[in-house]
Image (tube, rainbow, N blue to C red):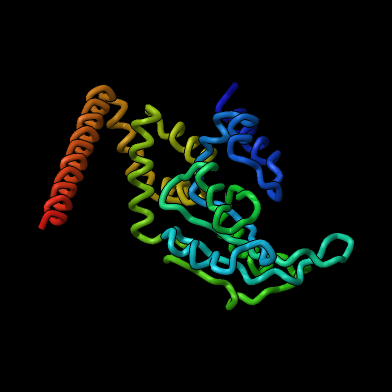
Amino acid sequence: MSDIDKKVEVYAELAKIDPFEFWDTDMIDKEFTPELKRLKKRHWLFIVYPESAPEDWKEKMKLTGVQFAISPLHDKDRLVDGDLKKPHWHMIVIFDGPTTFMTAASYRGITNGPYPKVCENLRGSFEYFTHKNDPDKYQYSESDIELYNGFEIDLSAKDVLKIKKELSELILKQNITEYMEFNMYVQYYLEADYFDVASNNTYYFNSLISSFRHNPEKIKARYRAIKAEISNLEDTNEEMNMEDLENDSRS
């Protein structure tokens, strides 16, 4: 099975999960493939219902530190037959980096709502908060959108730098030696933000790939050495911090 076929299969399995049913995590472990559990995306979509969400759910979400945006309360949406839908909020959560479906799903412990869905189009999902591009639907006020923990639609310079680092590491991990291969991987497997960064930094990534192609074993060896050095440094700092805590507790 090709990589593209695997992605299609994973998304099909994600669609099988009834978002309104409180599936037990163990059931997902047994019923679905490891690929679904490992599915990683940075942006996830949630629906939250006032009737089931705890009163302090927004505060609890805020304490997690993730960036998130909440739509106006959708209390005027209608079904095909004209009946009102159950009032609900739409929520977009942006994690610091690609995050697994299982981790994203754990936030239901805060919202007490449906399972999340992958957010492939951040701007489009954000504009759906008010039905901006759906004139036949009720138009909600943009001023009622709530943003938390620095949520931004457009990438900040810090976000761009972080994504460039992730993509640079991706080249090594995936053993990518051709720019077209890199372009296809980013386009089909990562969010639009990653593709934007890759497209706007063609010379940078093409230079990295060309350099890697000329001496991959040396570069991978250097990469492993640097990662090991960083890991050892982090372990040393953690041990020093523990010693400081123990000394403080004795004094």
Q: Is residue 200 above or below residue 63?
A: above
Q: x, y (%) of residue 34? A: 55, 29
Q: Is residue 220 above or below residue 137?
A: above
Q: Is residue 100 left or right of residue 158?
A: right
Residue at 34% across, 31% down:
172
Based on the displayed image, in which of its 4 quarters is residue 78 positioned? bottom right
Q: Is residue 79 left or right of residue 96?
A: right
Q: x, y (%) of residue 214? A: 27, 25
Q: x, y (%) of residue 122? A: 55, 56
Residue at 60% across, 50% down:
116
Quadrant (top left/top right/bottom left/bottom right) for the N terminus: top right
Quadrant (top left/top right/bottom left/bottom right) for the C terminus: bottom left
Q: Is residue 122 left or right of residue 168?
A: right
Closest to the observer, 48 or 76: 48
Q: Is residue 248 left or right of residue 128?
A: left
Residue at 62% across, 41% down:
24
